[in-house]
Image: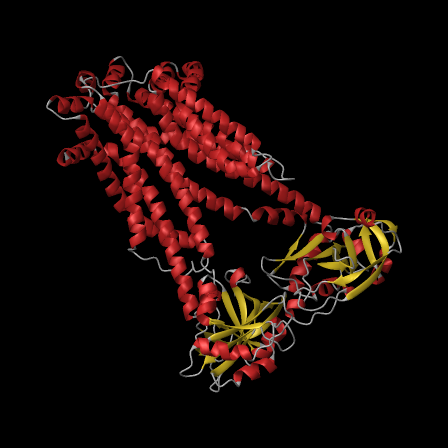
Amino acid sequence: MFRTALRTLRSHRLRFAMPALAIVLGVAFVTGSLLYGDSVRAAVNRAQSNSQPDASVSITADPAVPHWLDNTLLRRLRALPTAAAARGVVEGRSFLVGSDGTLVGDLNQAAGVNYVPDGSGKDVRYPLTEGRGPRGAAEIAVDRRTAERAGYRVGARVRIVVAGTARDARLVGVFTAQDSRVDSGGTLTAFDTATAQRHFAPAPKGYSAITLTAAEGISDTQLAQTAQKSLPSGLRAVTRADLESGAASDGDADKLTTLLLSFAGVALFVSTFLVANTFTMLSAARAREHALLRAIGATTNYLLRMVLTEAAVVGTVASAIGYGLGVGAAHLLGGLFDASGAKNATVPALSAEPLLAAFAVGIGVTVLAAYVPARRAAAVPPVAALRTVQPSTAASLRRRNTIGLIATACGALLIAAAVGEPDLLFGAAPLLLVGLIVLTPLLALGVTGLLRSPLTRLAGVRGKLAVENARRNPRRTAATATTLMVGLAMVTAVTVAVTSVNRFDEREADRSMASDLSIKAVDFGEIGEGTAARVARLADAEAVTPVIPTYLDLTDKTPLSVTAVDPAAVERAASLTVREGSLDRLGQGIAVTEELAAAHGWRLGSRVTGSFTSASGRTPGAKADLPVVAIYDGPEDLAPALVSERALPRAAGAEDRPTISSVLVKAAAGRTAALQEEIRRALDNPALLVQDRADARAAATARSAPFLNIMYAMLSVTVLIGALGVVNTMGMAVFERVREIGLLRAIGLDHGGVGSVLRLESVTISLFGSALGVVAGTAIGAAAVLGQESVPLVIPWDRTALFFLASAAIGVLASLWPGRQAARVPMLEAIGGDTE
């Protein structure tokens, strides 16, 4: 039996090529996802175990208990007999500007640290490879990878951005660092401790953390127990092992791996239709072969096992090739995504779990997809099997059509219900797609019936032949169209959702643009305290105000959202409408919107009492007793209350610095564009974005572009498998219709005519699958959008048209190889019989 299966595979190797390729792509996707996730986790764990080699115990603070780590505590811990050394750690956000004027590395992982030299001037945590450690406010050192990426050498004058302000510094050293932030594409900039404390310390001359090194012969646990006795309430000594075991650093990698595997599952699901379609068509083409085997004594179980063995061999070969491609896919995923540790993760060439998963998935999917066609082939009686074609009858589709109608109707109802209950969408979308898959043969008959007359008028007898060929076997047409439908449905759903969210973001950007120009920080950045004052000194700036969101805890413990602004400039900069009172006295009071005044029963002169919340929550808020000086209307970013920026408490340290969300700038008449360039030159800070209205809209929609591109990249594998399904069906159809094609040529249809029939049939099937996918995807995407409050539904007609054009192109390309195969068969040989 095994030898017979191998001979069959050799003789029909071209016919098995397309389903094997589909399985290869699916297995490569699965393998690449698993290998990539494993490599990221290994890189993160390696960086964690190697970082901070001198840290045996770390002192951590309870955020709920106000307490600072200071020099007094550091000296006390350093004097412990069980501690060989104690280190005060100061860290915060710091960006490095490259030689090309742009920020270097992953901004989320850009950090500033303090360099702590020993007696020889070296820091065990950051070993120098060039130069020396920083010794003053104008000197820095950076990690080696950052220096290479930025194009800097020791002695260079570099620009850094700290606390939202850009400044120049001298690069005096380059060091190596085993740090997960560097491994994930970030940067490390080292300052001397005094400078780092000014930039990052939560309190003057304080520390972000304190680490201890165990003395010789002392375990980490012993050191932690001894240190704990010296700590005040609110601080805790934690061993290195406990910190590493409690870190959830690989959570992002796990989530990303799960997401990738879900896309791989979709690709494999689509592959099952291609495999099943191939074995169904081959079973019909090999009917005489099966009949002869039955005639000489083969049982139905023998034929079933033989066909499944063929499927298992195809799956095994495809799995082996897919695993090899998966190793390369893991490297590509490392470049596509920026998960923690991805930048320097090493992908293993051989790994047990991904290898087992590759063969389990590849063989399992192939055998499962071939099972139903194998049973049908084995169940045909010897006499009936002598017929080379067994067309499906209308009766054979009756039960399927009934099930499909019920499933599709239920899916559609759930999609409609998901508008009010978004969670239902997770069950509604699969049910709708499954219902359409089951119902596709009936839909294929209906759609192709409608196309018969237009195609006949358009292409004559060739159009009619193409439609009739598509209608000849509705199951086969349905299976082929389904491979395209699923992929395009997901692509369309994502496109509808992202396009609608983009429109919402554009509207929000317009609404929040309260002035001619707005200055905002890049992601993970901040705006420096003196930024507004520097801009206000420019000649074309008529009015400038910072926008500082904070909270005022009222005496009844109700938190009131307030915005601190420059009272002298806010009315002109933001074009506020004052209904009562005046903003001239905002420096001594508070302004509230009409809605807020009505809700609290406030009028001009009413007293609003409470305390401002500190940014860190560790310091008591400043008490406030403010009269209502104005009632106004304004944009959402400046509602529901305004106070003077001078009313906010002074920051005790970096953690208590007020967060400036933006700076609003009113330009002199006709000078907006000129002022925009003036601000960029004056600030010279690539971490700050100076935007007009058009820039704000573009920035709002640009955030979704990487996500959409990644979704398209992931789903392109599914669409590619769908295209292979069309190629496979057309190629198999040529082998089945050799005699028919010979007769068409005998009565005058030339090579070009035969090719045009195949092209029209292929395009018809492709557009049918595309139409189902676009309609289903639009419904799913629309339900997802309508379930979100305030997000407008936008149908991307331009991209929808592009999807149809791409489907037509797939149909044309899919017919090229089958057309050449049909042209190669000699006419007389074709008339004489088929290729079997």
- Name the foreground residue: 402 vs 115: 402
Compared with 360, 124 (above or below) is below
Compared with 598, 619 (above or below) is below
User: Residue 834 occupies which quadrant of the picture?
Assistant: top left
Kindly identify the residue that appears in the image at 49 percent across and 77 percent down.
Answer: 225
Answer with left or right where residue 600 lies relative to residue 256: right
User: Residue 442 occupies which quadrant of the picture?
Assistant: top left
- Name the foreground residue: 826 vs 646: 646
Outermost residue to the left: 296
User: Residue 738 occupies which quadrant of the picture?
Assistant: top left
Q: Is residue 785 visible?
A: yes
Q: In which quadrant of the rendered image does the N terminus lie?
A: top left
Q: Position of residue 568 (x, y in %)?
A: 82, 60
Q: Position of residue 819 (x, y in %)?
A: 29, 26
Kindly identify the residue that appears in the image at 43 percent across and 41 percent down.
Answer: 715
Answer with left or right where residue 741 lies relative to residue 299: right
